[in-house]
Image (cartoon, rainbow, N blue to C red):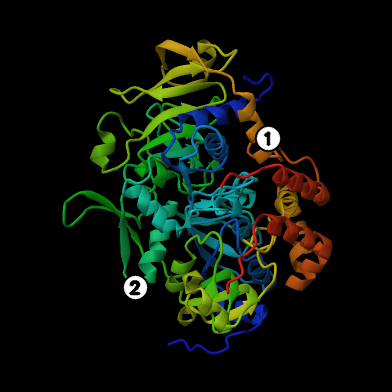
Amino acid sequence: MLAEKYTTKELMAVCCAHEIKNGEVVFVGIGLPMMGALVAYNTHAKDTVFVYEGGGVGAVSRRVPWSIADNPTAENALMIHEMWRLFGDAQSGYIHRGIVGGAQIDKYGNLNTTVIIGSKTYESPAIRLPGSGGGNDICSSCGETTIVMQLEKGKFLNKVDYITSPGHLTGPGARKRAGLVGNGPTSVITQKCIFRFDDETKEMYLDGLFPNVTVDEIKSLVEWDLKVAPNIKVVTTPRVDEVDIIHRLDPKGIMLGAKSEGEENFEEFFQIMKQAYESVELDL
Amino acid sequence: MKSSNDKQISLKEAVKKYTPHGSSITFGGLGARDPFAVAFEIIRQGIKDLTLIASSSMDIANILIGAGCIRKVEGAYIWIGSVGSGLNYRRAVEKGIPLKLEVEEYSNYSASLRFLAGSMNIPFMATRSMLGSDIPTYNQKIKVIADPYNGEPVTLVPAANPDVAFIHVQKADVSGNGQIWGILMNDPTISRAAKSVVITCEEIVSTREIRKMSNLTAIPSYCVDAVIQVPFCSHPMWTAGYYWCDLPFRRNFMLNNKSQEDFEKWLKEWVIDTGDWQGYLDKLGQDRLDKLVKLEHDNYKIPEIR
């Protein structure tokens, strides 16, 4: 049954979940990808093994993780590696898919999460961003990559300020020439639409629109001359059970970007967390 | 060669002895078992000019940067996860507040491999990460070469041997055999790569207890210089089996670090005026700590080993 009420972030998480095939080994990056992974695991992808950069493999937890290595990434895990071992497994081809976020992206899916230089320098940039984290490693070596990020002016550019994580680099054959082992990005999920990549040109094109969004709106936010699929679809809204999973596993709405409103009350937090995990039954 | 007798000292002594001005330092854990008690003691002792070598680091890195202890970071990620933005990091890199911060950039994998090389006493490790990206463009220490056997492109990163590693574990004996539950990060590896290793633990246990489940020993005593029992050492982060993440505390910290001025007020209240770790725990209050313990125990308890 389709949900009547949902937010665009919830739809993004659900679209991310739908990219995941059952039985894959999936490397999950921070933020909405984690929510997408949990929705997938709790619906169609029960045989999927999710791995987190901190080294947790196959964790099953009652709440969404808030970083790559906090306890929910290890809870009821199948196994715990050191971080370097898990990335080695990606490099050896054991990990089918990586899901990452990005701040800036170009038409080949190259990502920037390091610096927005603007008119300044790398050492003293206009805006310093977090850095690669595991993003470069995931995009370099996982079988394929799913990217989840906001579509806004200034993000989808002809050229990013700094290539942190490789998409298709400069186009067909470029990844192989550079020596990369993974196949690169296959989709980009935003709060307005879904992009996919052309098999031949390796360029991003518009494949699916979120409800009530127009092609023109998307084109106005993308700096390059965006290609549009001839059979462009409207993305289906989330199901009730999918939205329910998100609410139960992220009761504080952190993954969905809930901002802090003034001083946080510890007692409220304790009650919310307690109720949240008491309402989740794990199927181990 | 390090001896294996009783290595317990106080936290104050450990920080003083192993972290002189200008040291290179690394911390174990990430999002769990991050040794906040150690970071706060470093700030109290006014230690300066540190180089932080990390794969990723979150609140601890930001707090130390904001307190003016760090002049260089070698790492892949200095932010606050999904919980907030690395505002101290941004101020330091963008504006030089409180000090100009130099950044030597890697990816998580390649940063981890630096420790792996360091742990085995070899000068570098190879990886297929970072090829085609701008990370090597802006970091001359990363070399892209044709590998000597097959001629294929590979990236080389130099070994990391920090002067000191501080690692918080669940259980340790007095000679420094440290056992870890939950996420490992690169802790077994950094314990070999660092020249000095200080482990803090929730509980001191007998060596007999360690021997019951040797698979859990992540850090062998022969790598360890000092052992300190510091309960709640990683508050406000998790320590698996002991206490939950104190998210409101972290969010309040972030509300109070939007400017250097606000951050320094927060620092004075929580780090300087509390005097020491016990003073900090007293300020949090036993009720809050008990609730964090309950939240964790309801979800995960360390199994008893017979």
State the residue position of label 1: A247
Subunit of mark 1? A
Which label was assigned to residue B121?
Answer: 2
Name the image quarter holding residue B171. bottom right
Q: CA distance from mark 2 to mark 1?
A: 49 Å
Q: Is residue B96 visible?
A: no
**Residue nearest the viewer, comparing B214 with B159:** B214
Name the image quarter holding residue B40. bottom right
Q: How many numbered discs?
A: 2
Residue type, mark 1 in image: His
Task: Locate residue A192 relative to residue A167 in the image: left or right.
Answer: right
Instruction: Establish if A116 lies above or below A231.
Output: below
Secondary structure under tag 2 reads loop
Subunit of mark 2? B
Instruction: Establish if B118 lies above or below A284.
Output: below
Q: Horizontal and vertical percent for residue B27?
A: 55, 65
Which label was assigned to residue B2?
Answer: none
The residue shown at (69%, 21%) is: A5
The residue shown at (38%, 40%) is: A96
Residue type, mark 2 in image: Asn
Q: Horizontal and vertical percent for residue B6?
A: 58, 88
The local crowd at label 2, few if under 14, some if 14 to 19, many if 20 or more residues have their Cα within 10 Å, is: some
The residue shown at (59%, 23%) is: A238
Query: CB of mark 2 within 8 Å of CB of mark 1?
Result: no
The local crowd at label 1, few if under 14, some if 14 to 19, many if 20 or more residues have their Cα within 10 Å, is: some
**Residue nearest the viewer, comparing A284 with A205:** A284
